[in-house]
Amino acid sequence: MSAPATAPAPPSAPSAPTTPGAGHLWRRVRGPAAFIAGLIALALLVSLGAQQYREGLLEPEGPNPDGSRALVQILRDRGNEVDVARSAADALEAAGPGGVTVLAGAHRLTREQLDRLSGGLGDRILVRPTTPALNALAPGVRMTGRTEEQTLAPECGLAAAEAAGTADIGGEVYSTEGGGARACYPAAGGHALVRVSGEGHTTTVLGSPAPLTNARLDDEGNAALVLSLIGERDVVWLRPDPVPEQGQSLWQLIPVQLRLALVPLAAALLLLALWRGRRLGPLVTERLPVVVRASETTEGRAGLYAARRARDRAGAALRSGTLRRIRPGLGLGPDAAPTAVVESAAARTGDDPAQLGALLFGPREAGGDDSYTADDNGLVRLADELDALEGRLR
């Protein structure tokens, strides 16, 4: 006897959709979030470590080829105290007895600032100074020209120059007036290094900034020359910051002559615009992008006339077309007088000239009533009668 069959289990109800929880979302986003956070941290570390240095000719903090950071670092490594001054006031405050001031960028100082420096500084080294700087800080020294030679020999009795030997000091050359001056590195027209003494201090003038730059410091005897000129003394490195112009607009910076020239220029441009603006030029024919049938054009214009109830314009268009077609058949030109047209048509058809005149040209008096354009029926009658007249004239 067989066992009774087991009833099949009822089908399980479909599970309801579940909403992902916070833990599931966190597991999905933690990888990209950690990657982005790492990039942000790396960017912050790089930005903190990237220090911005000033750059420029004889810039004491500049690592660029024309900067002087290498020389300043050598001076500090061997025990010289180097103070960087960005203005004449800072240089006067930092300058002390027994020190030396290196002036680079004298063109950024005013005459008043140079006069204050001349009485407040001790020994000074002027690197390619301007004429006002020479007059204030090195009286008796004047620039006499330039030399194209780059490397020069000392040929003098100055100990610092003799110890350095040849150096890349070629550039501006100077001459001195009076005694007590020493001139080294001769070239055509003068000397590239001049030292004068007076009033308890010495002034050394260099005609080229090359020996002090990072790119040329280790060439020839450049380093030996500069270090010997400075010696064991503390250094004030004066490189003034440029002074921005204040209180002047762009319009004020334009020369007066140029501003006055703008008036006739504007007048000339206005006259040119008036002259050329009146010339419209010849008409240019263009091909239509699509071909429009004449019947569509006629229907379109008729629709516009009907929308504006312009029966007078519609009647004038019908009469104009009829006159254009019948004049050649009557042996008349396009400028024939209305009376000639009416007489010729009456002679050919035998119609009453008065009726033909009213049909072809409307009322005789301007502003008179026209029965053909008084209403829509009259306009239809006008079209029919004009068509019949053309048929009789063929």
Image (cartoon, helix red, strand yellow):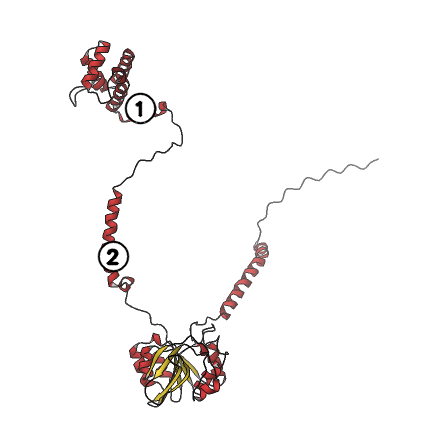
| 215 is higher (above) or lower (below) than 312 | below
The residue tagged with tag 1: helix, strand or loop? helix
Q: Is residue 329 visible?
A: yes
Residue at the image position 26 percent from the left and 47 percent from the top: 273
The residue tagged with tag 2: helix, strand or loop? helix
* Residue behind mark 2: 262
Taking the image as shown, residue 4 lies to the left or right of residue 326, namely: right
Indicate the quadrant where residue 128 lies: bottom left
Residue at the image position 27 percent from the left and 15 percent from the top: 329
Residue at the image position 28 percent from the left and 64 percent from the top: 253
| 281 is higher (above) or lower (below) than 106 | above
Residue type indicated by callout 2: Leu
- Front residue of this view, candidates 5 and 33: 33
**Residue 164: % across, % down:** 48, 84
Q: Earlier in the sequence, mark 2 or mark 1?
A: 2
Q: Is residue 231 visible?
A: no
Indicate the quadrant where residue 282 lies: top left
| 363 is higher (above) or lower (below) than 73 | above
Residue type indicated by callout 1: Ala
Direction right: furthest residue:
1
The numbered dot on residue 104 is: none
**Residue 149: % across, % down:** 44, 76
Q: Nearer the viewer, mark 2 or mark 1?
A: 2
Q: Residues within 10 Å of mark 2 (few under 14, many from 20)?
A: few
**Residue 394: % across, % down:** 29, 12
> Alpha carbon of mark 2 to alpha carbon of mark 1: how far?
57 Å
**Residue 283: % across, % down:** 31, 35
Direction left: furthest residue:
365
* Residue behind mark 1: 302
